[in-house]
Image (cartoon, helix red, strand yellow):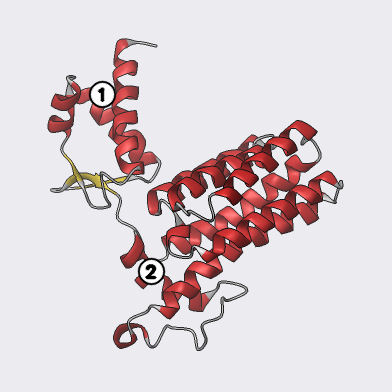
Amino acid sequence: MSAAEGKSQRAYRFLRERIDDGRYVPGYRLVLAQIASELDMSVVPVREAVRRLEAEGLVTFERNVGAQVALLKPTEYLHTMQTLALVEGYATGLSAGSTTPEQLRRAREVNERMRRTLDDFEPHRFTELNREFHSILFETCPNPHVLDLVHRGWNRMKVLRDSSFSFVPGRARESVEEHERIIELIEQGADPLDVELAARRHRTATLDAVLAYQSEHANPATDAASAPATNTPVSQPGADAAASASNLEARTA
């Protein structure tokens, strides 16, 4: 790796960490000269890092404005979760046949750690463990393209929202029970499609809970037209869910 490449990678990590942890919020302007000065390097590697982030959809560049952290579209959370449900469910199903007893033991141990956090609930810690749990079950996916899509989805979720469980903590206990069911299916040698569907339903159940929370806390003056008629979670997020996601993003992004 050349010195220039090393600096570009360092600048990328610097920017990416600040986007991921929320220090650089959507719309935050990235002043290249200022960042270069902070990192004690020239503007060139910083510009390369920004271009890389732009290719990943995390940064936008506008004429007369410059580079800024990408703004969130109203339905970004909805679409990301729907996509992640599909690709992560598929990856988990593909991995099921090659998942070892040791991996299942690790997954169950992580899930038990998640269970222990429920009484003194910390949403961010729960989310970290949640990612660790699912990674154990999908990382052996034999299709690298599918796995790349899963990673992109998780990374996008990290940018959109550190933890959905901050808004629907009651969903956490249900999530732990669903994790155990997925482990049992794999242990029993269930059909990969059954594992895939269980993992997919698990993801969409969280989406439904968040959308239900949004509808219950919507501003009646501005959201009456888009709010569902009842407070029960929708079973298949669709047009109504997309219409109501806008207020959620404004509240929780």
Q: Which residue is mark 2?
A: 248
Residue 166 image point, x, y percent: 43, 59
Q: Is residue 35 rendered to the left or right of residue 225?
A: left
**Image point 30% across, 50% down: which residue?**
70
Q: Splitting the image into 4 quarters, where does residue 234 fall?
A: bottom right
The numbered mark, 2 or 1, whose residue comes first in the sequence reads: 1
Q: Is residue 13 rendered to the left or right of residue 208?
A: left
Q: Is residue 140 visible?
A: yes
**Image point 38% across, 69% down: which residue?**
248
Q: Is residue 100 visible?
A: no
Callout 1 secondary element: helix
Is 137 placed above or below 197 here? above
Q: Is residue 196 rendered to the left or right of residue 124?
A: right
As drawn, the residue found furthest toward the front would be 119
Q: Nearer the viewer, residue 117 or 185?
A: 117
Is 149 placed above or below 227 here? above
Residue 180 image point, x, y percent: 72, 52
Around disc 1, counting alpha carbons within 10 Å, would you say few (fewer than 14), some (14 to 19), or many (20 or more)? many
Residue 222 image point, x, y percent: 30, 84
Callout 2 secondary element: helix
Q: Amino acid at mark 2?
A: Leu
Around disc 2, counting alpha carbons within 10 Å, would you say few (fewer than 14), some (14 to 19), or many (20 or more)? many
Quarter of the figure that contains the C terminus: bottom left
Q: CA distance from mark 2 to mark 1?
A: 36 Å
Q: Amino acid at mark 1?
A: Pro
Q: Which residue is mark 1?
A: 45
Q: Which mark is residue 55?
A: none
Quarter of the figure that contains the N terminus: top left
Q: Nearer the viewer, residue 99 or 116?
A: 116
Asked if marks 2 and 1 touch (Cβ < 8 Å), the reply is: no
**Image point 86% across, 46% down: which residue?**
189
